[in-house]
Amino acid sequence: MNIENTQSQMRKGVLEFCILSIIQRGEAYPSDIIEEMRKANLNLLEGTLYPLLTRLKNADLLNYRWVESSGGPPRKYFSLTEKGAAFYKDLENTWREMADGVERVINTQETVGGEQLTVNSEPPTDNSEPSTENPSNNN
């Protein structure tokens, strides 16, 4: 099995949500979206972004406006429509439910022979202070 393919599929699954997350904070220029995604280690190419923005606009989830630029052609800034804001909220709720469910699955606790075992997670660390009481000294 190819790990790169699986990783790519996972990224594609959250791409639309991440893009809408950026735009819902305020108007966004495509190169700013690409840069923010890059900083989050979610590399995104223009050839992927522009068709997605067009699809979201055609679904009435996004608006755009042209802004004149002093150093080149006008820039297209995207924002959410009312429908897009509602869609984003639904996606956000779905994401939180999924992320919580995935977290629960990968950190599942099992009981075997009366002992609790942690499955698929890092061993717990005990950062508590040592007790000064001696539990075996019950005089």
Image (tube, helix red, strand yellow):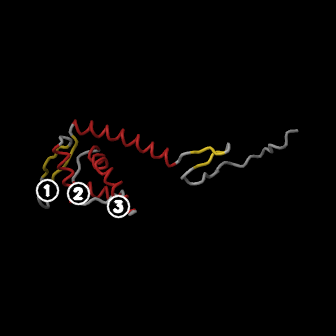
Around disc 3, counting alpha carbons within 10 Å, would you say few (fewer than 14), some (14 to 19), or many (20 or more)? few
Task: State which quarter of the image contains the C terminus.
Answer: top right
Between marks 2 and 3 in the image, the one whose residue lies nearer the viewer: 3
Q: Which image quadrant for residue 123?
A: bottom right
At horizontal 80% and vertical 45% (from top left) the residue drawn is: 134
Graded by Cα atoms within 10 Å as few (under 14), some (14 to 19) or many (20 or more), the crowding at tag 1 reads few
Q: Earlier in the sequence, mark 2 or mark 3?
A: 3
Residue 93 pos. (x, y %): 36, 38
- Mark 3 and mark 1 lie on one chain; the one further toward the N terminus is 3
Foreground: disc 3 or disc 1:
3
Query: Which secondary structure lies at badge 2?
Result: helix
Which amino acid lies under the numbered mark 3 shown in the image of this protein? Asn
Q: Evaluate if marks 3 and 1 touch, with contact meaning CB atoms under 8 Å apart.
A: no
Choose the circle earlier in sequence order: 1 or 2: 2
Q: In terms of secondary structure, where does tag 1 sit?
A: loop
Please tell me whether mark 1 or mark 2 is closer to you in this view. 2
Circle 1 sits on which residue?
A: 69
Name the one closer to the observer, 106 or 24. Answer: 106
* Residue labelled with disc 3: 5
Residue to which mark 2 is pinned: 48
